[in-house]
Amino acid sequence: MRRLLRLLAKWPIDRMLRVACVLGLVALAMMVWGVVSGAPLPVVASMSVAQGLGVVACLLFGLSIAAEVARGKPGAP
């Protein structure tokens, strides 16, 4: 557990939040492309690739929140 806390203390929060946002937007664009296009290939791509990108974005966001809590930044409730 201490190893995880030390790793999270060094986690680059700002960069990972930006990466999570970009991945989330790319996943959202792929999902919209699949819905608007209606062709089989875009639908399958949006169901598999976009879901994977969205999961990675969510994990990065969650790890960034955990890193912020592990650092114990002043001003946080």
Image (cartoon, rainbow, N blue to C red):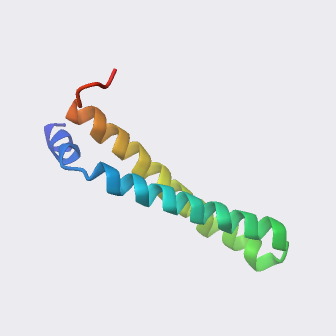
Residue nearest the viewer, comparing 73 with 44: 73
Q: As drawn, is 73 to the left or to the right of 62?
A: left
Q: Please give the name of the residue rendered at 51% of the width and 62% of the height, measured from the top-left corner.
A: 23
**On screen, residue 28 above or below 13:** below
Q: As drawn, is 23 to the left or to the right of 72?
A: right
* Extreme residue toward the top, this view: 77
* Viewer can see residue 15: yes
**On screen, residue 42 above or below 2:** below
> Percent from the top left, x then y, of residue 74?
23, 27
Q: Please give the name of the residue rendered at 74% of the width and 64% of the height, measured from the top-left corner.
A: 32
> Looking at the rendering, which quadrant does residue 42 occupy?
bottom right
Residue nearest the viewer, comparing 3 with 19: 19
* Extreme residue toward the front, this view: 75
**On screen, residue 29 above or below 73:** below
> Looking at the rendering, which quadrant does residue 71 occupy?
top left
**On screen, residue 77 above or below 24:** above
Q: As drawn, is 14 to the left or to the right of 18?
A: left
> Percent from the top left, x then y, of residue 59?
43, 50
> Percent from the top left, x then y, of residue 52?
55, 62
Q: Please give the name of the residue rendered at 80% of the width and 65% of the height, measured from the top-left corner.
A: 35
Q: Quadrant of the N terminus?
A: top left
Q: How many marks?
A: 0
Q: Please give the name of the residue rendered at 23% of the width and 44% of the height, measured from the top-left corner.
A: 8
Residue nearest the viewer, comparing 48 with 21: 21
Q: Quadrant of the C terminus?
A: top left
> Percent from the top left, x then y, of residue 60?
40, 52
